[in-house]
Amino acid sequence: MRTIITGFIAGFVSVLIFHQLGFWIANELGLLKVQLYNMRPVPPLGVPAILSSAFWGGLWGIVGAYVVSRVPLAVDGPWGWMLFAGVFVTLVNWFVVLPIKGAPVGGGFRMPGVVVVPLVYAFWGFGMWLIAGLTRRVMRW
């Protein structure tokens, strides 16, 4: 249960901080045009898009907490979380989520998004690592 709680908190909070910060940096550099902290309601429940993203980030955090803790020590810690989010989550987003939403696979693999999005996701993964560690320390786990 501790892994589930830690993973969810890490993924949820990291979306609100690191994921959005990563996209803000990409916006400021003129690489992408992403609406930050989007409050537009999304179906089916009509919750703000940012809360939907944070919820899904929390679910990915649970998966990451289980997966990263079982990888070889060479990629344990921040590298494991960054690779998990930057590679695995990106690939699932490109090849599963986007087609379900009716978008082209990989968002059409247009530049610079094809490079920037995995980097932002890796930054989100770094945030999950930090927040998971902080959560464990605060809860004395």
Image: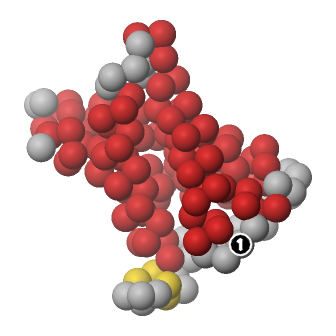
Residue nearest the viewer, comparing 74 with 19: 74
Q: Position of residue 6 (x, y in %)?
A: 24, 43
Residue at the farthest top position: 74
Element class at badge 1 = loop
| Colouring scheme applied when the structure was drawn | secondary structure
Q: Is residue 141 something one can see in this rendering?
A: yes
Residue type pointed to by label 1: Ala
In this rendering, the count of numbered labels is 1
Answer whether residue 36 is visible to the viewer in this image: no
Mark 1: few/some/many CA within 10 Å (<14, 14-19, 20+): few
Residue at the spot x=56%, y=76% of the render?
38
Q: Would you say 97 lies left or right of 94 here?
A: left
> Is 33 rendered above or below residue 139?
below
| Above-or-below relation of 125 to 76 | below
* Location of the N terminus (image quadrant): top left
Q: Position of residue 71 (x, y in %)?
A: 40, 20
Residue at position x 64%, y 66% from top?
Answer: 98
Residue 88: quadrant of the picture = top right
When asked about the image quadrant of residue 47, the answer is: bottom left
Q: Residue at x 58, y 60 (%)?
A: 96
Residue 81 position in % (x across, y down): 47, 32
In this picture, is 12 found above or below 100?
A: above
Task: Tell me the residue that label 1 is attached to.
Answer: 103
Q: Quadrant of the C terminus?
A: top left
Q: Is residue 37 or residue 6 the one in the foreground? A: 6
Name the side, left or right, on which 11 lies relative to 115.
left
| Side (left or right) of 30 relative to 39 | right
